[in-house]
Image: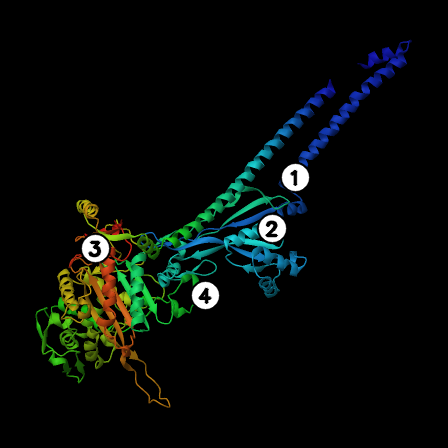
Amino acid sequence: MFPYRWLIAILALVVIGGLMVSLRQQRLRVMHESIQLHREAGKHRQEIWGLQVQLSEKVTTPQLRDAVLDAGLELAPLPSTPAQNEQQNDEASDTATSSESDVSHQTVARRDP
Amino acid sequence: MSLFARQAKAQKPNGSLDAIKREKLAQKPAKVGRLMGLFLTLVLLFLMGRVVQLQTHPDERVAKRVNSQVSSRALIGRRGAIYDRRGRMLASTRVDYRVFLDTKLAVDIDRFAEQVAYVAGYSPHFVKAKIERYKRSPRYVVLEERVRPERLAAIKAAKITGVGIEPIVVREYPYDTLAGELVGFTNIDGQGIEGAEFVYNAQLDAEKGKIEYLRDASSRALFVQSDQYQPQQDGEHVRLSIDATLQHICETHLRVAVEKFQAAKGEVVLMDPYTGEVLAMANAKRGFAPFSPANYRNTKPKERRNSCVTDIFEPGSIFKPFVWAGLTQMGMAKPQDTIDTEDGAWRTNFRRTLRDDYGYDELSWEYVLVKSSNIGMAKISQKIGYEDLRDIVLDFGFGQKTGVGLAGEENGLAPRPAKARHPRQLPHSQISIPMGQEIAVTPLQLVRGFSAIANGGMLITPTVMALDPTAPTPGLMRRRILREDIAKTTREALRKVISPVGTGRDVAKDNPHYSIFGKTGTAQLPRPAQKATATQPAQKAGYYQDRYVASFIAGAPLDNPRLAIVVVVHDPKRSLGLGWHGGQVSAPAACQILEESLLYLGVEPDVKPFEKTPSFFVVTGDASDSDTED
């Protein structure tokens, strides 16, 4: 009887030890994955910085102006009130001519008809 | 079994000895098992104790070995970006890569150099020269800073032993030279050295983080403990008050003026007169390309100085509106009062002769300003004491820093107190100061003082930081220095300067859309004293007869000024025959800037509707604009 009890105890210890090792292994894997993710996040963050700078370099005011002009868009004064705005849009669509508003308040890009 | 039972068994005659032996043999495995169990328990206990000891108090050698598997890495924090008032990025930080060589890891240097050159697309001579140059530090031979992405990918893919790649933080300026002097730059450590980068360094600066992690035998990161992770702290972003489009307009026109008149340099300051926000601050220096912060290493300090705040000059006639407004407020003259201007030449009672460019018998006080009469200004300023005149100058903020907070800002030179001067000098000063002599100012001080005339009499503190447009009181510090009616009267008089009868008549026809009011100035350049040479005799300090500072200070529109501007052009070449007066040199640039800027800001023309298509891309009104419009 006595050796069996020892055997069972030892086996139980082995099983518990194995389980603990397995849990520890899992914990290590999770932590490893977390550091990988951390690195990935840092990398993406740095890529975003680069992209932001690239974007800013491509849309400077002079470049935008040139792009608008190249695209054949005409810059026209925008009336100050919504009513005048609608009226001007109507006129523009009717006459298909460039706007020469006598009340300019803001300016927008409008497609050349 | 008890002792008595054993004895009884032993006394039995038949086979009792065998039985005892058998019984003893049967008990032996149990004893062995018990001993084994004891032994195993002891071994396990020992092992557990050892584990505890290793975890809590490891041996020094063991601890050293474990620690050698811990790596630490700095986490890069991002320095804050600098934006213009509309959120356009003027400066930002990104990560780039540097390639370096560890030549100690190379077996054959020549072969190594050729291999690196082949993979990365360098010339073998270039790589060898680099290795040769870094002979003293063979483990860190910097091959290239800021490597191109395709080259970086090739190097990474090749995995050559001895070639390393490390990230570096670089500062980028997407608008390149635009407002370069104002934006400033950082050094290699990412610390602001000049301009906004320097002034707002504490705000922009980032804090590095640190991470410690356990690595395996192949140096791969295994895991990090939470108590060994210190996150990085990114810097705060800064939004400047300048507008990139307005800055571009100012720089373009200033450069054209400086080149056209072959002037030494020029400055423009454009300001919102109500809030004190500097909307544009431009510098142009002949002989130097516009300053690019990214290229600061190849420039001299004088190329990149922001002369709008660091350089002072004698303003000349553009100073007259300040004294005129002050004298009018003190009741020394009314705009309609007639002044005897002596037909353009007047000898004072202390035997100094004053001259006007154009002689008039008499002028109204208003036309003294419109025609820029030195004699008229001198006669009225003599009605007050020297100290009162000095107070007028100081009230407009001259002779003191504006509070804009930019590095290297000059105080300028204001009149000293009467008791600190010789009594004989005072009468001279009293007629020199109203003409803009004996004082020195910066362009920013001028436009600040002029803003008080434009905004109804409040002296404001200028700023290059965008202000909160929803704040109840726009602007920073405000102090009333002029009555509202006096400011309006001064503006109306200055409006006549930009008319066929004023000194700004040359530009009167060129600004058809907005009612601009302003003042021209043409001041002779001061000449330092010169020692006698072989060819020339010694000369006292004085003024050059043919070298000037041509300037123009203005605002628009008349009734509700949205912008105040000063354009200063130093030493335009008179011999070109294109003109040298402020009205000829600086006024056209100032008026064009105002016209384009007001259109850009969506301000309704108050003179004549627009008939032509604007030539630049625009625009939505921002909150601060609508704020000042009310």
**Considering the image in quadrants, where does the N terminus of chain B appear?**
top right
| B200 relative position to B557: left or right | right
Q: Circle 2 — which element?
A: loop
Residue B130 screen position, x and y as percent: 58, 63
Give the amino acid at mark 4.
Answer: Arg
Residue B108 screen position, x and y as percent: 67, 59
Give the amino acid at mark 1.
Answer: Gln
Give the amino acid at mark 2.
Answer: Lys
| B92 relative position to B338: left or right | right
Quadrant of the rendered structure where residue B480 is? bottom left
The reply to whether label 3 and label 4 mark residues of one chain is yes
User: Which residue corresponds to mark 4?
Assistant: B297
In the displayed structure, B141 sits above or below B393; it is above
Quadrant of the rendered structure where residue B185 is? bottom left
Label of residue B53 in the image: 1
Q: Circle 1 — which element?
A: helix
Q: Circle 4 — which element?
A: helix
Residue B612 screen position, x and y as percent: 21, 58
Q: Is residue B89 visible?
A: yes
User: Are the two marked residues, 2 and 3, in contact with CB atoms closer than 8 angstroms?
Assistant: no
User: Which residue corresponds to mark 3?
Assistant: B603
Which of the marked residues, 2 or 3, is nearer the chain's N terminus?
A: 2
The reply to whether label 1 and label 4 mark residues of one chain is yes
User: Are the two marked residues, 1 and 2, in contact with CB atoms closer than 8 angstroms?
Assistant: no
In the displayed structure, B98 sits above or below B303; it is above
Q: Chain of mark 3?
A: B
